Every structure is written in structure tokens, then in C-alpha cells.
């Protein structure tokens, strides 16, 4: 099986949560929109085809006959297919619940720089962005990361992983959350990170996994930038 | 099995998507926080327990030993348990994808009245809300409802249901989306509804299903209000 990932070229964005899973599993995949003509191919698949199954927005994944959209839904599928989620229903649902909470956090991060409209430039909504970002770094970011830290602290199988005693896609997503937050809000993170020791330890262990380390050192890993979800703007720092 | 739904009492909110599924299936359930002492019970379950599985926020569902959070995740579980989703993986994932797109829409509706912070009152962010709501009614709402209309139009099994030839939880959610949008943005909907005939027809057929009609006429169906997700503010109308 060669998986085809379709996502905007040039940014990590929501697609990165999928890339990390494919990379950790050593899966064969093509990052289609980064190939010649790939973006046009992606746009065609955003139109209704014979299956009638098309996405509202990228990322989406082609896996054989399946065309699967929504980041968390893609991970729900890949977690089972690639052995990066528990097999039992209770564990699968719990892992997915954590990923959906990551998705909520990611939406809130995005809204720190686009609080009024995705159809306006950041520069056109900077004043509102300052208010939203101040609220985010002071209240929402700690609320989410406190929650994830508590999940690790209360995992009955130990605090090395988010779910059970093995790596799952939820762990890979936590790596990306910590990495993204450090890029976007370095002061807030530097000030508060010591309050999330289990999360930081998880981040570090994920970064050192051989396939993830190789991926992060490769050209396949795009840099963070002010085009993606996690953006660094000096004026939005607390 | 008696399901226990935990959600803020007094509002439809995100809990309503779960209630509609339980009602359509004729499931035995308790809306716990609406019982005496129920909110305290809900707050206790938001703390880490022995299972280590606790939610970031309501709604969550107790089903035997399972405690499941995140609205779309609850529907993923109930869809299978109550026969309101396809059995095959491809259909299950597609139904869930649609529900996650509903979840994105619901978050955007919420942000029309709270664009800057959930920790400020609406009255404190009214100016930003006007800009966000204008963008929402002009661009985002039509984009989402055009998409859902296209899903119905291109369903290879016919345009009566979102997925296949049978009712699924995605149909119940579309009913709630249309209902909520009509409450929150009546002018925008009145102006544009004729462009979404399949969606309006689906809404009407769901409303007429015997169990849904009985539910909507009962005291169990809470009214829309300016405490929930879908809020009507005259100054946010286009």
C-alpha cells in the first residue's frame, strides 16, 4: 500500500500530524501536492467524484479505494492500519478523544492570528489578534497543556505515553503541539514549561525515535513559518 | 444499557447532537446534569479517576465501563452501537468525516459571538463579533452549507440521506445545523435557503420522524437561547 497524502505544499499545518504518523510507521507514502502537478491533483479530488466522498478542505488521504478527510479521522484510520493505536474499542476511542482535543487546540492556535476572518490577512486583524493571543497564552494554552500533563500523570500504565504502555499517534501529536507552541509562543512556553515535565519528556523521547529523528533532519520536514498554523509574531508574545 | 449523558444543563449546545441520536434510537438515557446533584456529578467526572480517562470539557457519555468525550467521538461510538452509521469501515469513516466538518462549523458559529475570548462576555467583544459574524454569514456559512448540499447531491445512493440509503447520525446533525442557523441568522438563511433544497428537505424529513417529532415537542428539548452555541443577536444579522 502506497498512501497518498494531500495537503497544501509549503507548510506543516494540519498535514504534519499525518506526516508524523506515516514517518514513524515507516509507511510508503507520497506527499502529493509537493510533487509536480500535485496541487492540481489535490484540487480535483476536492470536487465530488463518482464515490460522492470529497473533503471540505485538505488534508485528506488516499488509501487504496478509500479517500479519508479530516485530520483526526485520518489518524483514526492510520492508527489501526499502522499499529499506532490500541486495538480494543475503549483504547481506540480514548486515543481519538485526545486527538480531537488536540484538534480543538490547533483551531484555537490558528485563531490567535486570525480571530476575525480567514479571508482577511493577519495584518488586517492585528489588533484583535493581540487580544486573542493574550487570552490564549494566559488562559487557554495552560488549560490545554495542564490537561494533557494530567492525562500522562494519571495513565494507569505509566506516564511515558498518553495511552497505555505503547506509542500511539496521540504521542506524536503531543510532540508536534509542544514543538509548535515553542515556535509560536517561546516566551510563554519558557515561562511555563517546567510545569509540564511529563509532556516535555514525552516530546523529547518522540524527537529521539530513530524514524522521527531522521524525518526531522530531512528535507521532508518543512520549517515552521508565518504561513502555517503555528506562527511566530513578536507583537503577539505575552 | 442505560446511557448517561453529561452536559451543561439549560442549553442545547454540543450536547444536542448526542441527544438527537439517543432520541432517534429510542435509547434509554439519563441527561445527568439536569437531575438533582447532576452538575456536581459531572464536575467529579471531569477529574482524573482510576481509569485515567477524563474529558477536557463536556459533553461526555458513560456507557457501561466506557467514558467517552468529544461530541463527534461519542457519535462515532453511538452510531455503531445504535445502528445509526454504516457497518463497513469506509462508510463509518465517511460519516465521521462529515460529523467532524459539522464540528468545525459549530466552532465557527460559536466564534461569531466570542471571537476574542471565551473568558470575556459577548458584550465585551461585540465590535469584533460584528466583523466575524459578517464574514461568517457572507462567506463561511454558504461555504459549509454548499458543501453539505453537494454531499447530498452526489450521494450515489440518492439524495435523501447524507450517507448511503439510510438515516445516520450525520442526518440528525444536519437537522440541528439548519435549525440552529435559522435561529441564529434568520435573515441570512431566509435569503439563501432556496440554494440548499436537498438540505432543507432532509431537515424537514428528520423533523417529522416520529421519535424526533415527539422529542422536539417534549420538555426534554431545551429552547435555543443566548447561552448556547447558536445565539440570536439582532446586531449580528447581515
Image (cartoon, coloured by chain):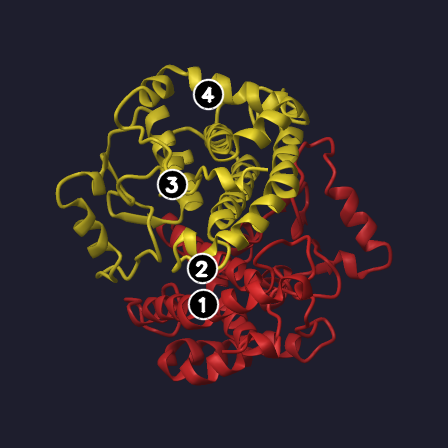
Chain colours: A red, B yellow
Q: Nearer the viewer, mark 1 or mark 4?
A: 1
Q: Position of residue B28 (x, y in %)?
A: 24, 29
Image quarter (top left, top right, bottom left or bottom right) of the C terminus of chain B? top right
Q: Secondary structure at mark 1?
A: helix
In this rendering, position of residue A107 left or right of residue A195: right
Q: Which residue is labeled 4 in the image? A: B206
Q: Is residue B96 above or below residue A186?
A: above
Q: Mark number for residue B54?
A: none
Label 3 lies in what chain? Answer: B
Among the two numbered marks 3 and 4 on one chain, the one whose residue lies closer to the N terminus: 4
Q: Chain of mark 4?
A: B
- Whether pointer 1 and pointer 2 mark residues with C-beta atoms closer than 8 Å, the reply is yes
The residue that disc 2 covers is: B117
Chain letter for mark 1, please. Answer: A
Q: Residue at x 55, y 48 (%)?
A: B130
SS under mark 4: helix
Q: Distance from label 3 to label 2 (Cα)?
A: 16 Å
Mark 1–mark 4 distance (CA, rounded to whole Å): 40 Å
Amino acid at each position: 500500500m502506497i498512501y497518498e497524502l494531500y495537503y497544501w505544499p509549503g507548510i506543516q499545518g494540519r498535514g504534519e500530524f499525518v506526516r508524523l504518523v506515516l514517518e514513524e510507521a515507516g509507511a510508503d507514502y507520497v506527499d502529493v501536492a509537493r510533487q509536480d502537478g500535485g496541487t492540481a491533483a489535490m484540487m480535483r479530488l476536492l470536487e465530488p467524484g463518482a464515490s460522492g466522498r470529497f473533503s471540505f478542505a485538505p488534508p485528506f488521504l488516499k488509501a487504496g479505494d478509500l479517500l479519508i478527510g479530516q485530520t483526526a479521522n485520518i489518524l483514526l484510520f492510520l492508527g489501526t492500519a499502522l499499529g499506532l493505536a490500541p486495538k480494543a474499542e475503549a483504547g481506540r476511542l480514548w486515543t481519538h478523544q485526545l486527538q480531537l482535543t488536540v484538534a480543538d487546540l490547533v483551531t484555537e492556535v490558528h485563531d490567535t492570528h486570525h480571530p476575525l476572518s480567514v479571508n482577511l490577512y493577519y495584518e488586517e486583524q492585528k489588533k484583535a489578534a493581540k487580544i486573542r493571543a493574550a487570552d490564549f497564552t494566559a488562559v487557554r494554552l495552560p488549560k490545554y497543556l495542564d490537561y494533557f500533563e494530567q492525562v500522562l500523570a494519571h495513565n494507569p500504565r505509566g506516564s511515558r505515553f498518553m495511552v497505555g504502555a505503547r506509542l500511539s499517534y496521540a504521542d506524536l501529536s503531543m510532540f508536534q503541539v509542544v514543538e509548535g507552541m515553542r515556535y509560536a509562543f517561546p516566551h510563554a512556553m519558557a515561562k511555563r514549561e517546567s510545569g509540564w515535565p511529563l509532556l516535555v519528556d514525552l516530546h523529547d523521547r518522540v524527537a529521539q525515535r530513530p524514524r522521527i529523528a531522521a524525518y526531522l533532519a530531512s528535507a521532508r520536514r518543512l520549517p515552521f513559518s508565518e504561513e502555517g498554523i503555528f506562527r511566530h509574531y513578536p507583537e503577539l508574545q505575552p
